[in-house]
Amino acid sequence: MFEDLREYAKENKVPIIRDEGLDFLLSSISKHNVKTCLEVGTAIGYSAIRMASLGVYVTTLERDQNAYDQAIKNIKNYNLENKIEPVLIDALEYTPSKKYDLIFIDAAKAQNKKFFLRFTPFLNDLGIVIVDNLNFHGLTNENPEDIKSKNLRSLVKKINEFKEWLKLQENFNTTFTDSGDGMSISIKL
């Protein structure tokens, strides 16, 4: 089960959450009794489908029309239309109408701080925020000056700055894991 989604992602070069990262996400959902999730970054709907398969109601935001259309198809194929609400929108333009137990950020890495600030007011007390790709293929552990591409160097610096900023957030207890491509989990205090 779900192999079709992984295969589609591989064939079409769509980045989806790595297996170890998915394990961390799903175990965090169980541990923290998550019932509702706001996901920033749908792609083909893989992580939303996996979360919804655990009974979580997911609102998922995607700005790319093609990815959104593919996610709709995948959600229908898994009969999860009643558990997943996909929204075609730039996440920074979206205003939730309710609060969530989990905010899962897996979108434009340079925007992590903006996403965190925008959506944490819609997090339930003791809710959690999980951010994916914080190791960015191992590049955040390297000296940024060794990265030849100016754009990539800038992105790695932004991710590292976000990680440092996240550690300083007094309303959250944040821990980091190398699961998948590096993730954080921030528990609202």
Image (tube, helix red, strand yellow):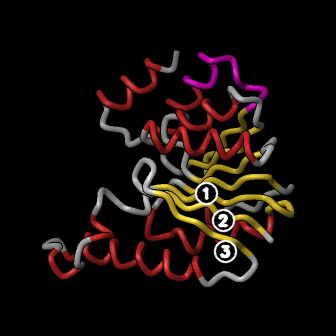
Q: Taking 109 as reference, is 27 above or below it?
A: above
88 and 34: which is toward the camera: 34
Q: Is mark 1 on a helix, strand or loop?
A: strand
Query: Are dots 2 and 1 in contact, CB under 8 Å?
Result: yes
Identify which amino acid the numbered label 3 is placed on: Leu
Q: Taking 94 as reference, is 25 above or below it?
A: above
Q: What element carries label 2?
A: strand
Rendered residue at 80%/43% (across/down): 33
**Mark nearer the viewer, 3 or 1:** 1
**Upstream in sequence: badge 2 or badge 1:** 1
Residue density around tag 2, few if under 14, some if 14–19, many if 20 or more, within 10 Å: many
Query: For the magenta stretch, what is the residue range?
Result: 73-83
For residue 110, what is the image quadrant? bottom left
Q: Position of residue 31 (x, y in %)?
A: 73, 45
Is residue 3 rendered magenta in the image? no
Q: Taking 148 as reference, is 35 above or below it?
A: above
Numbered circle sitting on residue 130: 1
Q: Where is residue 140 in the image (x, y as percent from the top left)?
A: 32, 69
Identify which amino acid the numbered label 1 is placed on: Ile
Rendered residue at 67%/60% (across/down): 129
**Alpha-carbon distance for marks 2 and 1?**
6 Å
**Mark nearer the viewer, 3 or 2:** 2
For residue 36, what is the image quadrant? top right
- Quarter that holds the C terminus: bottom right
For residue 6, what is the image quadrant? top left
Q: Position of residue 71 (x, y in %)?
A: 55, 32
**Upstream in sequence: badge 3 or badge 2:** 3
* Mark 3 lies on residue: 117
Q: Taking 146 as reference, is 188 above or below it?
A: above
**Upstream in sequence: badge 3 or badge 1:** 3
Numbered circle sitting on residue 186: 2
